Amino acid sequence: MRKLLALTFSLAIGGFVMGPAQADPADDLAAFQNYFKQKFPEVPFQDFANGVYAIDPASRAQWEAIEEFPPYEIAIEEGERLFNIPFKNGKTYADCFENGGIGIAQNYPYFDDERKEVITLPLAINECRVQNGEKPLPYKKGKLASILAYMVYTSRGNVIDVKIPSLSARDAYEKGKQSYYARRGQLNMACAHCHVDNAGRRIRADLLSPALGHVTHFPVYRSKWGELGTLHRRFAGCNKQVRAKPFKAQSEEYRNLEYFLTYMSNGLEINGPGARK
């Protein structure tokens, strides 16, 4: 019996069971989204893209006021300028992406079956640079975050529809899933402890946001940072908060985690870049 339990490896947090390892991802998706729909029945499904502001009316009013003159607006403008500057060989980012890189953020991340790995949009941006004789940019902030902000902005309103097309893709998904539910660090906590089990509760002065929709609004301008940052910068920050050593941005571990989380947000609209505390 113990061997059977070890093999099935159910991922349970506070009464919510994701299902055993290698369970059908579609079943995982239904269970994950239904959990949040039941936990916050007053929240329209699409509103989960707004993170904590979907469940906290007081904070939402402040956020909506900030969004009238968003602090990330300058980054979008800079990103558009950088996106259109030709490389030394005369090509631009538009030459690397379908539809010239416009309105495509909802297609990322995806699993490349030839390379056997998850490809994120920041990774693709830097690979575009390298293929055209340019140096890669730092992944957490700066110019890459601005380029990403512009590309994501052109994708607003497009619906996330991540696919898991093969057994290799399934393996990457499962690794991301296990990462999300694995305890880590000196505090021995998983991502899901905060954003699944305790979503809607307070940790000190902060309300914990639901996991559903976490990926829709990146990159984000955080008041804490005073600048724009990427999703993997946020992953690293969460790891540090539980006193765990973070992985490098765009590591295989974080790309798999992004793949899982984005699949869990299928059906939601891209609404980035965003502003958060």
Image (cartoon, helix red, strand yellow):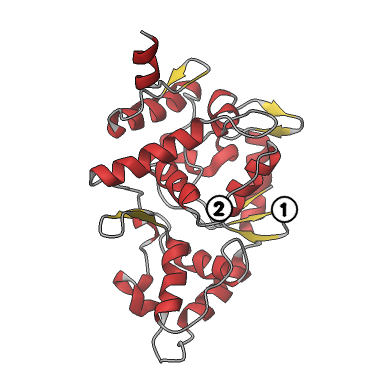
Categorize mark 1 by other alpha carbons within 10 Å: few (<14), some (14-19), many (20+). Answer: few
Q: Residue drawn at (51%, 43%), measured in percent from left and top?
A: 214
Q: In this view, does 272 lie above or below 85?
A: above
Residue 21, given in percent of the width and then of the height, sits at: 36, 28
Mark 2 secondary-structure assignment? helix
Q: Residue drawn at (71%, 34%), measured in percent from left and top?
A: 206
Residue 42, given in percent of the width and then of the height, sits at: 49, 26
Which of the 4 image quadrants contains residue 29? top left
Which of the 4 image quadrants contains residue 144? bottom right
Position of residue 192 in the picture relative to residue 94 (left or right): right
In terms of sequence position, does the residue under pointer 1 or pointer 2 come before the other? 1
Residue 167, given in percent of the width and then of the height, sits at: 24, 42
Which of the 4 image quadrants contains residue 31? top left
Residue 110, given in percent of the width and then of the height, sits at: 33, 54
Quarter of the image with the N terminus in it? top left
Q: Nearer the viewer, residue 131 or 265?
A: 131
Q: Which mark is residue 223?
A: 1
Q: In this view, does 23 lie above or below 170?
A: above
Whether residue 277 is visible: yes
Q: Which of 55 and 140 is in front in this view?
A: 140
Q: Residue drawn at (48%, 43%), measured in percent from left and top?
A: 49
Position of residue 33 in the picture relative to residue 138 (left or right): left
Residue farthest to the right?
204
Q: Residue drawn at (46%, 44%), measured in percent from left and top?
A: 257
Q: Residue 248 carries which label?
A: none
Q: How far apart are marks 1 and 2 (CA)?
A: 17 Å
Q: Which of 50 and 86 is in front in this view?
A: 86
Mark 1 secondary-structure assignment? loop
Q: Name the residue under label 2.
A: 232
Q: Give the amino acid at mark 2.
A: His
Q: Give the amino acid at mark 1.
A: Ser
